[in-house]
Amino acid sequence: MPRSPLIRPGPSPSSNPLASSGPFPSSGAADGLGLSQLTRLLRRSWRWIAVPTVVAGLSAVAFVQVVPPRYTGEAKILLESREAAFTRSSQERGEQAVPIDEQAVASQVQVVMSRDLAREAIRRLKLVGNAEFDPDVAGIGPVQRLLMMIGVAKNPLERAPEDRVLEAYFDRLLVYPAGKSRILTVEFRAKDPALAAQAANTIAELYIASLEAAKTDTARYASTWLGGNIEALRTRLAEAEAKVEAYRARHGLIGGGTASQPLSAQQLGELSTQLSQARTVKADLAGRAKLIKEMIKDGRAFEIPDVANNEIIRRTVEQRITLRGQLALESRTLLPAHPRIKELTAQISDLDSQIKATAERIVRTLENDARIAEARVESLGAAVDSQRDVVSKGNSSEVQLRALEREAKAQREQLESYLSRYREASARDAESATPADARIVSRAVVPDVPSFPKKAPIIILVVVMALLFSMGGVIARHLLVDPDNGRRRGEDEEPGAGAEAAQPSAPGRFAFPEASPGLSRSGVAAATPFEPLVAAAPAPVSPGRPSVRPGAPAPGRFALDGLVSRLGEDARAGIGRRILLAETGDQAGDDGLSGTLSGALADLLAPGARTVILDLNGPPCGAEDVGLTDLVAGEAPFLDVIQRVPGSRLDMVPRGFLDIDVLSEEPEALEITLDALAQAYDWVLCRLREADGEAARALLSAVGGAMDTVVIASNRDADDPELVDLYALAEASGAGRVLVARDRAVADMAARDFGSDLELRRSAA
């Protein structure tokens, strides 16, 4: 069955008198006061400014003249290590002093402000009874007596005298470090300049004395404790050494010599030495006897040292040499058979026999000595074996002995350490033996100029503050009485405008919630997946007709009562505050909001409720500006992206500088942003331009689920495939409700073409 053609009547964007050149409609000048108006306002109200300023200045002059002056005494203390090297222990001399850090300086500030030091300072300065610090000494007033009678207050005279002065003392005491240095500044304020200087010096001296006393007390405590433990330690050492000696004597572990070895071990060592010597002697004798035998066998007995060194053998060898000389002499003239030759030969042989016999006797002597040495080796070996058994049996006892000796040694070392520390602590126990780790580098002098009041600064400050408050009061009064500054009075009125305003307004462009015909030419209802709303075309506006403020029912504005009524019902039920306005190509206006459903609805809601409009896919901002995409991406805060539309209560959020894909890629961040805006605003309107485009469809699918209502502005037929797809896409995104708006002119023309018996359908709920 053929469909009815789509008719799209209506004015073009260029002929629309409501279209503005800017992105938002302007309904008047900006609120507030201009610089020139502010100057004129202050000039007109000079009396309201001058009189309070003069009064405040005179009051300040009277105050600084009447109030009693106070003087401040200032003393400076340097924190440093002042302990001499000779007063430090041997271990401390090798260590470096711990540097004084900021925490240590802050701790010393609290020490100076301690209550114990304060009570001593109060006693030395005799502040008890001073009317400035102890006002109760003059007597108790009637009010105080009344409070004491009813039990609300206590009698201040029942407190200790120093405790009554503590509060006033701490009010006038100021202790602080000078910058990041190790210098403490002590300031004390008083009406008497001499008392101020004396108090600052006294507090500094008491602080130094407290440090010295703390060191002396520490040394005295150490010496007392060490002295009490040294005697007990000496007793324990004597007992330990007695146990060692008794155990040594009981088990035969008596030591001797400088080595302090057990006697059995020493005996074993001596026997081992003797055994080694006996074995050496035996080997030496056996070797000498063997060598002499070989020499005798070779006929060289007289070459043996022991034989040659014998006196008899030496004389015999000399005789032999003499006889051999005679034999050689006689052999020159005599034959071997001569009796003389035979006699000499016999004498020489006899001497050789004597030498040989002597050598043999020496060999027998050496062999006898070797046998004696062997016997000694055997006896010493047996003695060593026996002593070794004795030593091995004493080793188990020696283990216990060494344990007792270690215990005695530990007691001895501890006693020596205690004695050394006791001597060091005793040396520090004397007065002024260890100076305090601080010294006064600047003593307080009697001040000549009071520290309070500073007359000139106080007067100038009071006059300036009075001038500023007076000017602020004048401006605030003017803004409260005439917030618009009279600039909107008659702004929308021209000759004849009142008569025109009294006339009933023409039908607007978008009128809700009438139903639109979705029928074919045969009169049978077309099956569409949605029920579109009907919109009406704007009434003609004559040139020069002034515009009205947003929300005012005037000609040229859109009739949205039906939609606002339906949205208001949802709002009262707690839903429907987030609305997505999807504008298709046949319904979108110019680049601004004029002539669009988004601009009309925003202008209508803004005067009566907090309203913000978000431009989802508008033109991007400049590099220096930020908008919605920057907010969702976390690159900008809310206060930077929300802008006020000039001349109205409507706030707007532009698209932003970052790419529009951020809204699809960060659904959780977008949901959080919309929730935050929904908590701050009554209505959150989101404008989606060119909703039938591919990029806009993807954005609708991404953000539709976060919306309570999606309104599609389209002039297409109800069964148009593109409109049906757009509607289905909005429903599939998870939106709470989907509505469709179309021009009333198109609906009326379709009704005339099909007759008056068209069946109307209800709009989508």
Image (cartoon, rainbow, N blue to C red):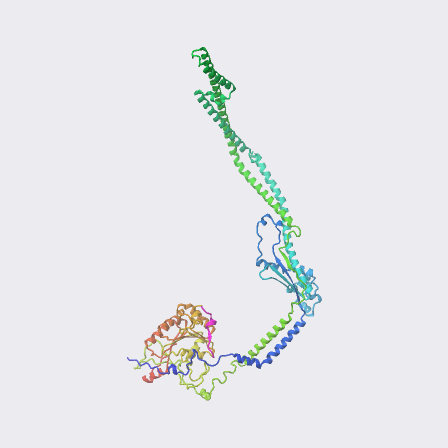
| Quarter residue 253 falls in | top right
329 above or below 556? Answer: above
Q: How many marks?
A: 0
Q: Nearer the viewer, residue 411 or 344?
A: 344
Q: Looking at the image, which residue is at 57% across and 50% down?
A: 95
Residue 536 appears in the picture as rendered: no
- Whether 665 is among the magenta residues is no
Q: Residue furthest left?
A: 1
Residue 543 placement, left or right of 223: left
Residue 266 at x, y percent in the picture = 54, 33
Q: Seen from this angle, which residue lies furthest front? A: 333
Relative to the observer, which residue lies in front, 402 or 351? 351
Query: Could you say where residue 298 lies in the image, as x and y percent from the top left?
Result: 43, 21
Residue 109 screen position, x and y as percent: 61, 60
- The magenta stretch is 635-647
Q: Is residue 235 left or right of residue 18?
A: right
Q: Quadrant of the N terminus?
A: bottom left
Of all residues, the one furthest to the top in this rendering is 339
User: Who is closer to the viewer here, 740 or 630?
Assistant: 630
Residue 652 figure quarter: bottom left
User: Residue 377: x, y in percent?
Assistant: 49, 27
Left or right? Give the position of 164 relative to 414: right
